[in-house]
């Protein structure tokens, strides 16, 4: 397994995301979406999703977390609470996530 370390530095925080890839698989070029202010439970969480587009990212989020109403996700996108890393060699899907907590 190969592990790549990707760091983003928002204005007041540093978050590190580890991207895992199993040896022998052929990754495809996607974008990496780091979405804040989602998966809330008293405080907001975050999700990291690899997808070719923001529209597909939304579909993956909805499928993975089984939300009937994904208003929290839509609000985060509308408010600009996300970062994009383009051209990442990573298969499509949820890479990592953290639920908010108290």
Image (tube, helix red, strand yellow):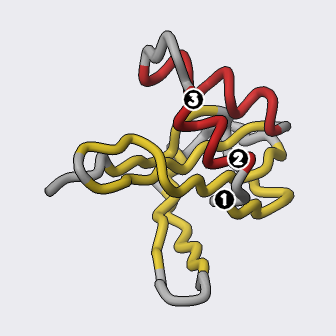
Above or below for 4 versus 92:
below
Left or right of 82 on screen, residue 97 = left
Q: Element at badge 2?
A: helix
Residue 10 lies in what quarter of the image?
A: bottom right
Q: Considering only order in the chain, which callout, 3 or 2, is on the residue closer to the N terminus?
A: 3
Eyeballing the image, is 61 above or below 22?
A: above
Residue 41: name its quadrant.
top left
Q: Earlier in the sequence, mark 1 or mark 3?
A: 3
- Report, in whole angstroms, how far the alpha carbon at label 2 lies from the one at label 1: 6 Å
Label 2 crowd bin: few (<14), some (14–19), many (20+), radius 10 Å? some
Mark positioned earlier in the residue sequence (2 or 1): 2
Mark 3 sits on what residue? Answer: 71
State how far apart marks 2 and 3 are (Cα). Answer: 10 Å
Mark 1 — residue?
Answer: 82
Secondary element at tag 1 = strand
Residue indicated by mark 2: 77
Mark 2 and mark 1 residues within 8 Å of each other at the beta carbon: yes
Residue drawn at x 37%, y 54% is 44
Residue at 58%, 73% in the rendered image: 6
């Amino acid at each position: 397994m190969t592990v790549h370390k990707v760091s983003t530095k928002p204005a007041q925080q540093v978050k590190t995301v580890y991207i895992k890839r199993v040896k022998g698989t052929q990754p495809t070029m996607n974008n990496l979406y780091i979405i804040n202010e989602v998966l809330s439970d008293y405080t907001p969480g975050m999700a990291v999703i690899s997808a070719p587009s923001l529209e597909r990212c939304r579909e993956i989020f909805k499928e993975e977390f089984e939300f009937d109403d994904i208003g929290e996700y839509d609000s985060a996108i509308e408010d600009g609470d996300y970062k994009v890393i383009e051209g990442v060699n990573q298969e499509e899907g949820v890479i990592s996530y953290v639920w908010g907590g108290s």
